[in-house]
Amino acid sequence: MPRPLVPLLVVLLLLGAAARAAPAAAAPGQVMTFEAPAELLDESRRDAALDEIAAFGVTRIRQQVYWRDFAPSPTEPMRPSFDDTNADAYPGGTWDPLDHLVDAARSRNLEVELTLTGPVPQWATQTGTDQLTRPDPAVFANWVTAVVRRYGDRVDLWSIWNEPNQPQFLLPQYDDRRRPVSPRIYRGLYVAAERALHAVPGNVRDRVLIGETSPIGDEAIVAPLRFLRGVLCLDGNYRKVGRCANLRIAGYAHHAYPTRRGPLAKPSSPDSVTIGALERLVRALDRAARAGVVRPRLPIFLTEFGVESRPDVVSGVTLARQAQELAIAERMAFANPRVRAFSQYLLRDDPPVEGVPAAQRFPGFETGLRFSDGREKPSYAGFLLPLAVKQFGASDVLWGRVRPAPAVTAVTLERNRGRGWRAFRTQTTNPSGVYGLRVPHRARQRYRVRWTAPDGTVHTGPPIRPY
């Protein structure tokens, strides 16, 4: 017989101990963010995608807003003459896709986070020869003013730049002596943007996130914690250097993608932060707080996340592993009290490139819940009903949630010991749709969840093995 139900807090404590993670209580009001750029700016697919996202129970979408896509003459080296703080001065129709997205999202009670980012118009860079090198902070601030004047009455969560520690979004990353320079460039852009944003009447209390960093560093990419220290004017020991003024920051945004080794793995570099090494970011922000450059317990927003799957034969895991690893990662984020937002990047996979070798066919992201042709992966059902199962001694500790549940609901838990699926427990969730329990471990035992929605539709999650 299964052991009696244990409180959710105890489940989180057990899971935290098993993963050697300190946090054991979820952040209050943790939000799921969804990003589906291909669909959400496509007039023919936007409404169906938003309906699908809202039906998941998601409450926020993130949209990157690329400066170059709005500017006149973006490939010219000379700045055209126009009032770049006035949205109406930009080319006709420029704003239409974003206008329609913001309005359509709000009509479905979806909050919108806008990430204002490069690439930029060439005339806004130091050299005028590309769209990435040393963008002018003052000119960026003018564009930010235009964006906020247009959307500030409907958006109150913003972030500045996407993955500024990556060379495809900001250059240069290093100088000739291999010293990081992108943190200093980004700091200037952030300061200019934050001040411009909060100067727009009615937006003085809007939240602005810093960072949006990618997880791994190398010879071309500044590792996220090294980047963080540079932006905050800290040395390698988190001591303040120079006379940098403190920044106004609502939270730190990060993209904690796992490696192919899975969500529990930690990168060897101590300055890299995947979901399995999230405590590194927590500790770094705490040390920055002790140095007096950020406020204590600064919130973390995991604004972009996904697990690459097949058919990508180079970076993708199996479809079963994708569903399982997404649930494990979500449980890890849920159990961390500093994490205010988790996310899913892509509804559909990026389309493949035809006519090339298999190893080159998938240059984009295969993190979608659907294949590029629209077919559902197992992770689609897993996103509706995420379930993570951790073996802890002689027990399996289960954590799950019913994402679309509007309130307390009940789920049926099933297991398969090699003789087919059999129900063994009806479990009641908390008001957020979350539940936890502990049952005896059996070798080769798998679990899954069944849930009947209020409209009578029965949803079945994918098979999940203990890890």
Image (cartoon, grey):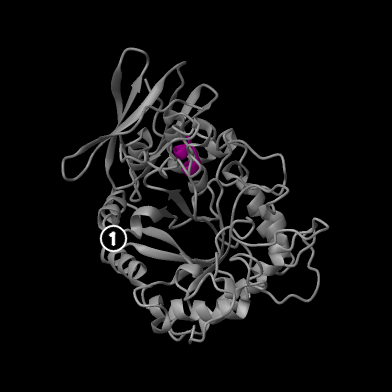
Which residue appears at 50% of the width and 77% of the height?
A: 144
Q: Position of residue 224 (x, y in %)?
A: 66, 54
State the count of labels: 1
Dominant SS in magenta:
helix
Q: Is residue 329 magenta?
A: yes
Which residue corresponds to the image point at 70% horizontal and 51% vertical from the top-left?
A: 220
Question: 13 or 269, which is in the foreground?
Answer: 269
Q: Quadrant of residue 420?
A: top left
Q: Is residue 350 above or below residue 292?
A: above
The answer to whether residue 438 is visible is no
Report helix, strand or loop for mark 1. loop
Q: Is residue 69 left or right of residue 347?
A: right
The x, y position of residue 387, in whole percent, is 40, 35
> Can residue 53 be found in the magenta stretch?
no
- Do we see residue 347 in this rendering? yes
Badge 1 crowding class, 10 Å Cα cut-off, few under 14, some 14 to 19, many 20 or more, is few
Residue at 37% across, 37% down: 382
User: Which residue in the protein does label 1 denote?
Assistant: 43
| Residue 422 at x, y percent in the picture | 29, 20
Q: In this view of the protein, which residue sits in the foreground, 371 or 462?
A: 371
Q: Residue furthest top?
A: 419
- Asked where in the image residue 77 lies, by quadrant, the reply is bottom right
